[in-house]
Structures are given as structure tokens and as C-alpha cells.
Amino acid sequence: MVINEDDVESGAFFINHSNPPQLRKVTAVVTDDKGNKRVEYLSKSSVIRGRDFDPGHTRSNPPLMDTFIADCEKRLTSEEVQDLLKSGVLSEDEI
């Protein structure tokens, strides 16, 4: 599935291409001093219940927008996010 740059916004959830897939929550989209868009995000397993989010990158060097998009399979729909909530992978305070 193609991800558009406009799909990447704070609060959005994505799944990457790893096995098992990693859940990514975008916390910010920032512009660096060279004018490049970078994506700050948290990550955790998409299949293990009750696991906390951890920083998904070094804080001083978030990935470029193109790199983040290439690493992700798709943006999750609100229904998919609700399914993760029901399964215990996500908690109410993480949404």
C-alpha cells in the first residue's frame, strides 16, 4: 500500500514491514535545519499485549520522511487501532 506524505501526521499509527510487524505512533513531523521533513515516532510490538512504547529512533536524528514511509507498510485505520485496543496491544492512554 502506498503511503502519502500527507498521511504522516502526529497521532497516526503505522505498521512496518518486519516480522512480526512493529507498531509505530507518530509523535511529530519536524523540519530540520536543511529543510528536510523528519518523523519522530514511538514503536512497539504489534502482537505482544501490554508492552510499552519506546523511542523508535535516536532523539537527535529522527528518520527522513521518505525513509519512514519506505519502512512502513501502511497507516492503520481507526478500526484497526480499535482492534489493537481490544486485543490489549494498545491501551486507552496510548491512543
Image: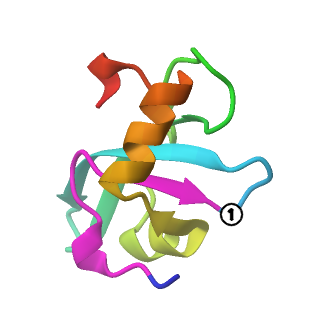
Please rate how many residues cluster around mark 1, counting C-alpha atoms within 10 Å: few if below 14, some from 14 to 19, many from 20: few
Kind of element beneath mark 1? loop
Above or below: residue 34 compared with residue 20:
below
The quarter holding residue 17 reads bottom right
Give the amino acid at mark 1: His
The quarter holding residue 8 reads bottom left
Label 1 belongs to which residue?
17
90 displayed left or right of 38: right
Query: Would residue 9 be counted in the magenta stretch?
Result: yes
The quarter holding residue 30 reads bottom left
Q: Looking at the image, how many numbered discs can be counted on the residues?
A: 1
Residue at 28 percent of width and 18 percent of height: 93
User: Residue lying furthest right in this view?
Assistant: 19
Above or below: residue 4 compared with residue 40:
below
Q: Nearer the viewer, residue 67 or 83?
A: 83
Residue at 32 percent of width and 61 percent of height: 38
Is residue 89 visible to the viewer in this orientation of the structure? no
Is residue 25 visible to the viewer in this orientation of the structure? yes
Q: Which residues are magenta?
A: 3-16
Q: Position of residue 33 (x, y in %)?
A: 20, 63
Q: Position of residue 39 (x, y in %)?
A: 34, 56
Residue at 57 percent of width and 14 percent of height: 50
4 displayed left or right of 88: left
Q: Position of residue 27 (x, y in %)?
A: 27, 42
